């Protein structure tokens, strides 16, 4: 299990440090073997962009991807 799982209300920031949204939920995905989260962010952030999420007072890198993360028990390939 990872040390950094984003939780609800964790701020999401651009790489420049500007707050662009917040996490609505987060957990560890046993299928993907990584932490995943859903967040509401500003609409100008593109899929494939990298952002940072504050987790336990530390910034953790995250990638903005399309849903779903998993389909039929397998990882969905993200572009």
Image (cartoon, rainbow, N blue to C red):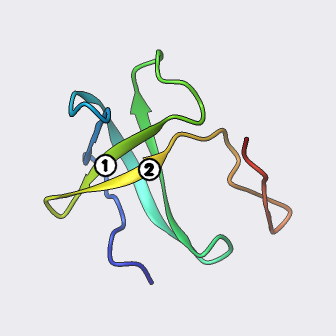
Q: Nearer the viewer, residue 78 or 1?
A: 78
Residue at the spot of label 2: 62
Residue 53 image label: 1
Name the image quarter holding residue 26.
bottom left
Outermost right residue = 72
Q: Nearer the viewer, residue 8 or 53?
A: 53
Distance CA(mark 2)–CA(mark 1): 7 Å
- The quarter in which the N terminus is drawn is bottom left
Task: Please give left or right for residue 22 compared with residue 40 in the image.
Answer: left
Q: Nearer the viewer, residue 62 or 9?
A: 62
The residue lying at 36 percent from left, 66 percent from top is 5
What percent of the width, then of the height, locates residue 19?
Answer: 23, 30
- The quarter in which the C terminus is drawn is top right
Q: Is residue 77 above or below residue 48?
A: below
Outermost front residue = 16
Name the image quarter holding residue 59.
bottom left
Number of residue marks? 2
What percent of the width, then of the height, locates residue 45?
Answer: 47, 23
Task: Please give left or right for residue 53 compared with residue 2 in the image.
Answer: left
Mark found first going from the N terminus, 2 or 1: 1
């Amino acid at each position: 299990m990872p040390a950094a799982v984003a939780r609800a209300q964790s701020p999401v920031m651009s790489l420049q440090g500007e707050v662009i949204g917040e996490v609505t939920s987060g957990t560890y995905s046993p299928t993907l073997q990584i932490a995943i989260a859903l967040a509401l962010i500003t609409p100008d952030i593109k899929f494939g962009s990298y952002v940072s999420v504050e987790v336990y007072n530390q910034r953790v890198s995250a990638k903005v991807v399309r849903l779903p993360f998993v389909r039929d028990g397998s990882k969905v390939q993200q572009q």
